[in-house]
Image (cartoon, rainbow, N blue to C red):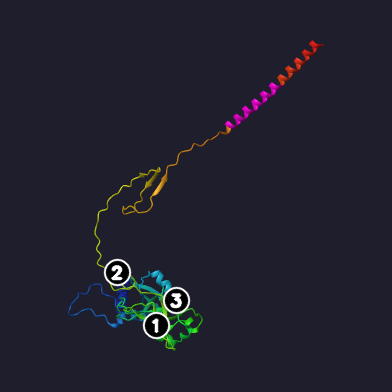
Amino acid sequence: MVDNESDDDSNHTVNTNELIESDLHIIPDEPVLMESNNPIVIDLEDIQEEVDFWNSAVVCYIVGANPPLNVMEGFIRRIWRNLNVDKVVMVKRGIFLVRFLTMDSRDKVVAGHYFFDSKPLILKPWTVDMDMEKDDVKSVPIWLQLQLNFKYWGERSLFKIVSQIGKPIKRDYATTCRDKLQYARVLVDVPLSQEFVDAISFRNENGEMIRVGVHFEWRPTLCSACKMIGHMAPECRQGNTKKVWVRKHTTVSTIQENGNGATEVPIMDPEGFQRTLRPIRVRNSPVVPTHTTNTFQLLVEMQKEGDAAIGEDSLVEVENESNASGREDSSHSYG
């Protein structure tokens, strides 16, 4: 009876495994030998689940900056807090993948312009065969501030003026609504190959040449070694710098005395070099003795003073008595 039950259980287990393998296509236990004539084929059905999951994602990076994941995630969830952000993950250093719950949210994000510390945020919709690398950026959107008479703040005239710098994209809200008249602010797609000028000129409606100061809210720095934005050639990590091992020499700090009785102690840095700063001066001031008194000594002195006072009073009384007796004797003699 027991043997029959065990046989039934084993048959049931085998049947269950067969169902699992047929439904989920589990990889067989034995490895499949690779054959050049008969390679393993991955079709679209094998990857469709992951493709559907990441279709509503965007790949983004910041031009000229590589913030850590926690900083980038906090920034993204703040600026897109109403756009159903599902998750923010790092693909590699400086490149992030942001998934939204809906395709509409993804499309709204891709259509906008966003900035991190005045640096542009580059956005691209995720695709199946996308290369997760930073593209060679030829131009970047930058906000410009122009000290311009507000009669030229209309889109037609303002876009004409800034077209000398790059392709105008849009005016900011304050400029469009004429709320702040200190300067005009406009977003321009600026080519990196040109010089970032401090002023531009145009001829006004009266035929006069007008010179306008231009302020770039962000000026990109281009490395001549790696052609990347965000650092200069001396700071480049991909340069041809070679580290040479040099033995560290041990140094002993000496104490010197000058003529004024001051002691100079040189300051050494961790590499063993003496700093060219003002040395620390230790003044050798003379030792002045401090007079201290005991509480019991004060009592002894006070007692001595009291005894001396009592002795003086008794002496005075004795003298008075002797004088009185002398007067009496003299009266008897003269009597």
Q: Indicate the position of residue 255 as horizontal and vertical percent values.
A: 35, 45
Q: Gap in Å between the C-alphas at discs 2 and 1? A: 33 Å
Q: Residue at x 39, y 81 (%)?
A: 200
Q: Quadrant of residue 143?
A: bottom left
Asked whether residue 235 appears in the rendered view, the answer is: yes
Look at label 2 and name its amino acid: Ala
Look at label 1 and name its amino acid: Ser
Task: Name the mark on residue 233.
Answer: 2
Few, some or many residues within 10 Å of mark 3 (<14, 14–19, 20+) = few
Among numbered discs 3 and 1, the one appearing first in the sequence: 3
Look at label 3 and name its amino acid: Ile
Q: Which residue is mark 1?
A: 201
Few, some or many residues within 10 Å of mark 1 (<14, 14–19, 20+) = few
| Dominant secondary structure, magenta | helix
Q: Which residues are magenta?
A: 297-316
Asked whether residue 109 appears in the rendered view, the answer is: no
Q: Which residue is mark 3?
A: 79
Q: Is residue 256 above or below residue 110?
A: above
Q: Nearer the viewer, mark 2 or mark 1?
A: 1
Q: Indicate the position of residue 106 as horizontal and vertical percent values.
A: 40, 81
Q: Quadrant of the N terminus?
A: bottom left
